[in-house]
Image (spheres, rainbow, N blue to C red):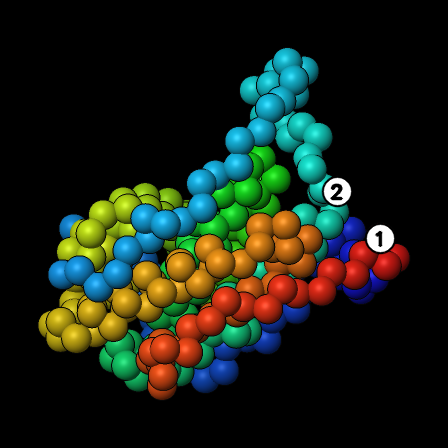
Amino acid sequence: MALLVRVLRNRISISQWVPVCSRLLLVSHTQGQWGRALSGTSQLSSTKDSPQPVEEKVGAFTKIIEAMGFTGPLKYSKWKIKIAALRMYTSCVEKTDFEEFFLRCQMPDTFNSWFLITLLHVWMCLVRMKQEGRSGKYMCRIIVHFMWEDVEQRGRIMGVNSYILKKNMMLMTNNFYVAILGYDEGVLSDDRGLAAALWRTFFNQKCEDPRQLELLVEYVRKQIQYLDSMNGEDLLLTGEVSWRPLVEKNPQSILKPRSPTYNDEGL
């Protein structure tokens, strides 16, 4: 825990906490490779039973300072939320089986494929944390911040020219927000809508096997439901999430996850 605090205070890049994805191949440094189109139209399951967002009453002063772009007082210490956000982003890249996605979705083993898979899991975390009121929304901003630090650091490690890296980071940022909007619209729609969003964004309109789309729609639905079953207070304090496997060996094995243990010793 103390080590995490030092990382945040010294603003060390998140990627130093997350090993570079093994055997990732940067096929090209051109805009085409980095900028696979990201945008966001069958019935397997539903997320209508998701918990409702937390309603918070805030004072006039808090409303004023937040209207000016600052973050007002939160339920928990911002340092604790930042540490939890770091852990949550780390879970998106350390606890995800990228090799299985490459294999079952027939994706090339490239940096861009890694980014698309990571983006999908980051988005699912954002969907969950937005339900936790102002503290959850603040945590969402920090998760996205860590994601971009990680992407930039990985690009530098892979030897991408600084000018090309900056240009592609701008393109990826724009595509990221388009993807988030598309996924949000898709998850609130029926399975056809979600499948269309995944086809346009995750598969870049190049998926010819409907079974792959069906697999991914089912994965997103069950994962959103699984995250919703996790206690919001625990997520804000620990940031520890787990992911269901892409293919369930036993579909009946989806159980409510165990609550993580929070230890703030040294904070």
Tell me what residue is drawn at x 68 percent, y 35 percent.
Answer: 74
Residue placed under numbered mark 1 in the picture? 267
Measure how far apart labels 2 and 1 are at the Cα level. 10 Å
**Could you say where residue 130 lies in the image, as x and y percent from the top left?**
49, 43
**Could you say where residue 117 lies in the image, as x and y percent from the top left?**
38, 67
Tell me what residue is drawn at x 16 percent, y 69 percent.
Answer: 207
**Residue closest to the far right:** 266
Q: Is residue 69 left or right of residue 173?
A: right
Q: Is residue 30 visible?
A: no
Q: Is residue 52 visible?
A: yes
Q: Nearer the viewer, residue 250 or 110?
A: 250
Instruction: Examine the image and state in which quarter residue 29 appears.
Output: bottom left
**Could you say where residue 103 lies in the image, as x and y percent from the top left?**
30, 84
Q: Is residue 46 left or right of residue 16?
A: left
Residue placed under numbered mark 2 in the picture? 77
| Tag 2 near tag 1, CB within 8 Å | yes
Say which amino acid is labelled 2: Ser
**Could you say where residue 15 lies in the image, as x and y percent from the top left?**
61, 66
